[in-house]
Image (spheres, rainbow, N blue to C red):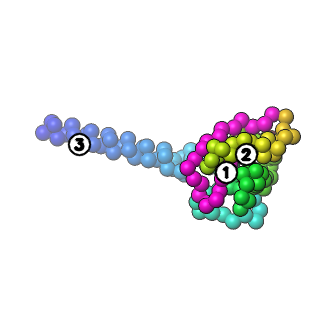
Amino acid sequence: MHSTHARRHFAVLVAGALLGAVAVLTPGAGAGAQASPKQAVVPSGATRSPMLTPGIRVGDLLFLSGQLGGRDSTIEGQTKQALENMKPVLDAAGTTVDNIVKCTVFLTDVNDFARMNEAYRAFFSAAKDPPARSTVVVAALVRAGAKVEIECIAAIPK
């Protein structure tokens, strides 16, 4: 009998702990619930996608979704277009290219690195301090013919 009572007591404790965890993790739960710290940034006239948001603002940072470079067949053209595609999202968040602090470049061919780098450098040529960057070679990108995808993080001035 003692063993059954101990198991029942343990089960009640576990259930209580799980319910408490669910209350803490559930948005809007609890007396001190706060609004989400993230805010969607969608340029005027842009179509919302159920899969991704063009930008997410968290505090003074803007996280931009990866951009592909249009239908240009050259790595230089695709790189320039991918970076240009970020400008409307930056503008909608109240920031500019000058405030990009980090970029990640995804390339499908390591042999395109030097030419991508030239187009990237030209885009950021006016920047006193170009953004930090990582470049990763990947097997493929989501659109056939895409050679480069670029995502960035930007600061939003106060």
Left or right relative to 98: residue 66: left
Q: Determine whether label 3 and label 1 are within 8 Å by CB.
A: no
Near-viewer residue (109 or 156): 109
Mark 3 or mark 1, whichever is nearer to me: 1
Query: Mark 3, residues whose alpha carbon is within 10 Å: few (<14), some, or many (≥20)?
Result: few
Residue under pointer 3: 8
Residue 52 seen in this snapshot: yes
State whether residue 39 appears in this view. Answer: no
Sort mark 1 into few (<14), some (14-19) or many (20+) by Cα contacts within 10 Å: many
Q: Residue at position x 48%, y 44% from top?
A: 24
The picture places residue 144, in percent across and down from the top left corner, at 61, 61
Q: How far apart are marks 3 and 2 (CA)?
A: 65 Å
Residue at 19% in and 40% down: 5
- In this rendering, position of residue 91 left or right of residue 141: right
Using the image, determine if residue 121 lies above or below residue 108.
above
Residue tagged 2 = 116
**Magenta region includes residue 156:** yes
Residue shown at the point (32%, 40%) measured from the top left = 13
For mark 2, give the secondary structure: helix
Residue assigned mark 1: 148
Disc 3 secondary structure class: helix
The residue range painted magenta reads 129-157
Front position in the image: 136 or 114: 114
Height in image: 141 above or below 110?
below
Residue beneath the point at 59% across and 54% down? 141
| Left or right, 125 with reference to 49 | right
- Circles 2 and 1, Cβ within 8 Å, touching? The answer is yes
